[in-house]
Amino acid sequence: MFNENLKWYFPASIPKAVQLIEQPGIILHGGGTRILKTQSRSIIGLVDICNLKLDYIKQKNNLYHVGAAVTFGKVVKFSKENNCLSMLGTALSEAASTPVRNRITIGGSIKDFPLWSNLIAPLIALDAKVEINNGSSKIIPIEEYITSGMIKTKHLVKEIIIPEDEKIIWRIKRFTLLKFEYPIFNIAIKFKFNGSLVHDAAFVITGVKNRFKRFNKAENIFMEKNLSEKLIKQAMKFIEPKFVSDYKYSSAYKEKVAKIIFEDLLLDIAGVKQ
Amino acid sequence: MFKYVKKAVEKIDGLALVTGNEKYTDDFSFDKMLYVSVLHSGYAHAQIEELDDSAARKIPGVVEILSYNNVNTILYTTAGQGFPEPSPYDTILFGKTMRFVGDNVCAVAAETKEIADIALKKIKIKYKRLKPLLNFEQSDNSKIIIHKNDGAFPKIPVYYDASKNIAAMVEAEAGDFEKAFGESKNKIEKNFYVSYASHCALEPHAAVSYIDNRGRLVIISTTQVPFHVRRIVSHVAEIPISKIRVIKPRIGGGFGGKQEVLLEPIAALVTWRTKRPAKLVYSRKEVFNSTRTRHQYKTVFKVGFQDNGIITALHLDALENSGAYGSHALTVLSNAGSKTLPLLNKIENLKFTGKGVYTNLPCGGAYRGYGATEAYFGYGQIIDMVCEATNNNIVEYYKKWSIKSGETSPIFKALGEGKEGVAMTITSSSLEECLETGSKEFHWNEKKKLYDSNFNKGKRIKRGVGMAALMQGSAIPEIDMASAYIKMNDDGSFNLNIGATDLGTGSDTILAQIAAEVLDVPVEKFIVTSSDTDFTPFDTGAYASSTTYLTGQAVKKCAENIKEQILKVGAEILGVIQNEVEIENEQVITKPGFADFRKISFAEICNYSFYQNNQFQIQATASHVSPKSPPPFAAHFVEIEVDTFTGIIKVINYVAAVDCGTPINPILAEGQAEGAIVNGISYALVENYYFSEYGKLLNDTFGKYGVYTASDIPPIKVILIDSYEETGPFGAKSISEININGPLPAIANAFFNATGKRLFKSPFTPEDVLKVLKG
Amino acid sequence: MKIKFNINSKIEELEIRPDATLLNVLRDNGFTEVKCGCSEGECGACIVLIDDKTVNSCQVLAMSAASKKIKTVKGIGTLHNPHLLQKIFASTGADQCGFCSPGMVLSAYSLLKENPNPTEKEIAEALDGNLCRCTGYVKIIEAVRRTAQIMNENLISRE
């Protein structure tokens, strides 16, 4: 327990919630997992988002809108039952553990983006956008949201918007030795083909220095070309993830293994494509 | 044939456990209870120059603060062992010298846990930081002396030299190793390292205490050793034994981690001084940092052998990192030798040397396997190396050279627990059948042949198989004592009271099965009360693989005495002489062949003995000390995949054939083996303590430490192959520890089979594996 | 402050701190069948159901569970009226020390409600938030599999 005088707020509208969190020490509460991990004494008020009606997954014009209050568990279930959002659904099904997935929300995970997040890599690869509200509503690509520093400002995450495209071929990898362990990194790879030619590609890794890295140069190598082993070898030169050493693994090991896994996944897709 | 033994009887507490009905220590709360928090040292080595708790005492709700300012300096050992303990008296409840990150500084008792935690932060402490000693290989040459002028001493007459950081030393020899090794044509000499590990019992350590209506102190504790707790608390808290009652309720796993008296004296002192109930529950981080661990070890094996594979000389030299205090330092060390070296008993020249040294790191203690796990890592690989070098089939090799029924090993006598051991002849072993059946089930020969061929050549993912043969012990001979008490009730039910400590193993059930078998009464007719120092007779506790074997025999003796009394009363009622009756299905009946069949039920017999004639309570007590420690045996087989690009080892198949004598309860016996194997695998592949350069444990949560989940386990098959141990109850030996010893050597051997390289350091992390593959 | 909770289908008005976890509130009010193994959402001993979904109650602020249906292991079966899962857990040797059992049983219960015919892999995955150090999981997985089989063969309700 961290603050005996903690105040709870249950606003019924987004503007009201945004107004509340503008005050110092007041933050949003979705599932609460992150708040309980930190147990910061500087938290004096919690704004619960349960009355904001953000617990939705909707499809509109080839776009999926996933509300901030949706739990990982709900995304996984929705993905399985509706045979959609397969990359995101699979990535989240591997996150943490079943009871934790029933609690972690999309909103909280976007805003906090822990190093071991399973969420961000697929979202970047999918060119997802995030709708936030800091007095007014804005829709920003997820990559920009993180790199622009917007992530650190006070705001409410309303939803993520994910273009659904059945034609993509994707692979993800959460690298751990054990099921319940913080992953060293998460990789997400996406290809879109036009006939046999690569039309779009995204290679993303999280858990690296600066939190995430997208390898645009490597992606570009494949554009409008056939996915071949030769091109993969070429592309691998541009896939150089940089890590920080920790007590378990050196940066050199992580870099080596991340590259191996990138190559494995790319070759796997190439194999399927041929 | 047995009726209640060797049956998969449901645990008597099973339904109560799975419906959440059973109570564990932290589930007990009392009115006006105080909550206790302990401040632990953040420094690995420091001297407290001043401890000022005046500000903390002013906080409303703070009731008591214990520190060296107001608690007497009494040396003791936290090891919950028999008295006098073979572990050195080197610990003080609240001392001035901090010897590891996690050492006790002081404790606060307050009206709420939150107040206690806040108060801890208000205690002003002036530390003088000292240089820590963090490398155990440098301990005995170090200028840093961990126990300097603190009076630490051995309680029993053994070698101990705190001035050289030596917590324990053991030597034993049979034959002449140096001579034989010198003359050997073939020699192997290798160093092996195993890591620290945490028991990770799901229930954290806890103690709750209160004063009963007559002013006595009652301690409810998560302990494996209630009687040792009573004795040690009496010593440390200076309260007479007669004033202390210790109760072990249900306990959420122990594995040796709760064979340690850590929290009880603190809760006891709070309650004794304030006369109020007190509760102390460790957080998971405190369990990782401050309680006990598996010892880190370096073992050096030297082996000399002939071209045909016959080993003529073997020397095991063990260096043990005891950590800051020498809890179990000596006995874990002796077991590293005594539980491995007798296995291949025909080696004529055997030598064991061992040293346990102090460091400023967390303390080792008892951990399932108890030295054997640490030593089998090298032992099992050395045997594999000899077999590989001499083209011996390792399974056949173990069959031929392992100790057999009727045989002995000089090591049994040479290596005891703090004193000379006990000579013993093996009277039960099905190891040969374990090797045979296990290898068949595993398809050892086919797989070994396949992976020995060029199957793996050029492949990124390489496969291999490995195996190891193992032994352990059952109880500590001529030291450990267990006792049992049984009384009969007027409906034909019985109270079975034992001091033995069921830590989830099911020993309450197993002991009831043994009594049921003797008395031919269903298990559910036994009301089992265990582990309450006021109401149950003495038992050394749950350790050393002893409860089934040792307490089981006490229960059997006790039940046999009850049986005699029942027969006597039954005969009296039936009007026959005692040798004309026998018991069957809760009745005394006249024996077959007796002309006039008569019978009388147990309920009627008890009623008679209560109310009718020659009244007395049918009751008995019995004690048992074992003259020997018959080893269980096992053969473990493992198949692995090695990703030579990432260094990840994946176990894909595991078979263990185990000889535990008669498995009193086969399902519970299998469960012991399965649990130990999974813990053994995770110890081999993942578990470790990672320290900062200042000696602070870095991975002190489950998530960072890495505990296997249901999703991480390979297919595991356990096969129980009976033998009959005449000194055990209905032929039983032990099973709880042995199976944790197999995965380390078996996986390492499989790795060699897959890659041609040896693993000398555990855990086999992917990064280390890659280094080995490169090197 | 006093807050109303729906625990095991009974409305309970409990005095709580605003920063209390659901785990602490439950245990402080006698629901000691909810165990505490780590307080960090990593062991599963404190699992309860909130609106039929498993959660680590140590990772839930009690205030946020106020209007929801909370179920502890006693909410699905008691000593005198055990759920089939509990009976099979006990008879299969899926319980050793029993400290993980309440959480483990609830995870299995939640799985079988969603998926009456789980494969062994699906069972293992559904139990990925429950640590057990005693059993090695072999008999736990077997108990869940057997329960599913018996429920399906005898058309027993999964409630």
Image: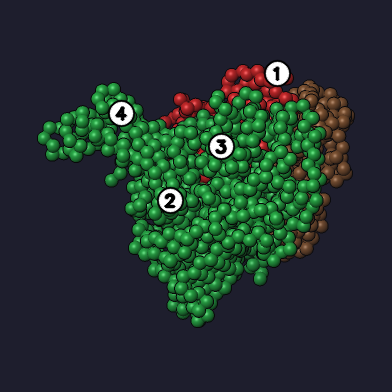
Judging by the rendered image, the residue that carries numbered circle 3 is: B240
Query: Of the residues shown, which amino acid type is indicated by label 4?
Result: Phe
Say which quarter of the image contains residue B623: top left
Q: Which chain carries label 2?
A: B
Judging by the rendered image, the residue that carries numbered circle 1 is: C2
Query: Of the residues shown, which amino acid type is indicated by label 3?
Result: Pro
For marks 3 and 1, give the CA distance.
45 Å
Judging by the rendered image, the residue that carries numbered circle 2 is: B734
- Disc 4 is placed on an element classified as loop
Q: Which of marks 2 and 4 is nearer the N terminus?
A: 4
Nearer to us in this view, A232 or B154:
B154
Percent coordinates x, y for residue B168 in the rendering? 59, 60
For marks 1 and 2, give the CA distance.
53 Å
Name the mark nearer the viewer: 3 or 1: 3
For residue A117, say whether it is visible.
yes
Tell me if mark 2 has few (under 14), some (14-19) or many (20+) residues whose alpha carbon lies within 10 angstroms of its own.
Answer: many
- Colour of chain B as rendered: green
Judging by the rendered image, the residue that carries numbered circle 4 is: B616
Name the mark nearer the viewer: 4 or 3: 3
Q: Mark 1 lies on which chain?
A: C
- Colour of chain C as rendered: red
Percent coordinates x, y for residue A60 in the rendering? 74, 33
Q: Residue C127 carries which label?
A: none
Query: Of the residues shown, which amino acid type is indicated by label 2?
Result: Ser
- Disc 2 is placed on an element classified as loop
Nearer to us in this view, B212 or A192:
B212
